Amino acid sequence: MSLGTDGLYASTNSGTTFTKIQGVQNSKLFAFGKSQPGKSVPTVYVYGMVNNVNGFFRSDDMGVTWNNIGPVGAGIGLGNEPQIMAADRQIYGQVYVGTNGRGIYVGSLK
């Protein structure tokens, strides 16, 4: 569950309780994608602030560790305010971001 400036939370019991994902200070957008090969948990993508750095991030271990996957340089879209993010459930490492008027940004490991 994404709570903006309160961070990102996860549940392991169908929503009865939630635990804050450490290191995520702001979760503006998040999505689940295909698991990394050999892992059983989905890949998590976040746009926000992780470990005091703003950007796009990927976690292959449900938020224990994060990789900064954002583009270098200027932000994405008008005013650097992406509006929606979805991760591919068929292709590991692929994420789609609606850029607020500048098309679709596609991030990929390829």
Image (cartoon, rainbow, N blue to C red):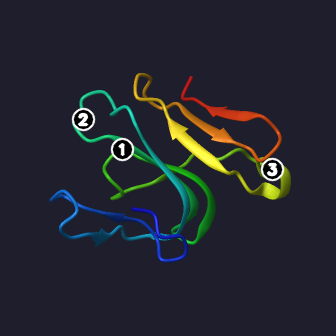
Res 98 → quadrant: top right
Q: Are marks 1 and 2 in contact (CB under 8 Å)?
A: yes
Mark pair 3, 2: CA separation: 32 Å
Q: What residue is rendered at 18% in x and 58% in y? A: 12
**Three-letter amino acid code of the residue under disc 1:** Asp
Q: What residue is rendered at 18% in x and 67% in y? A: 16
**Three-letter amino acid code of the residue under disc 3:** Gly
Does 35 appear above or below 17? above
Q: Which mark is residue 39?
A: 2
In x, y percent, where is residue 13? 15, 59
Q: Which residue is mark 1?
A: 60
Placement of the C terminus among the 4 image quadrants: top right
Seen from this angle, which residue lies furthest left? 13
Q: Which residue is mark 3?
A: 73
Mark pair 3, 1: CA separation: 25 Å
Placement of the N terminus among the 4 image quadrants: bottom left
Q: Which sits in the foreground, 78 or 91?
A: 78
In x, y percent, where is residue 32? 41, 43
Circle 1 packing at 10 Å, graded few (<14), some (14-19), many (20+), is many
Mark pair 1, 2: CA separation: 8 Å
Q: Are marks 3 and 1 in contact (CB under 8 Å)?
A: no
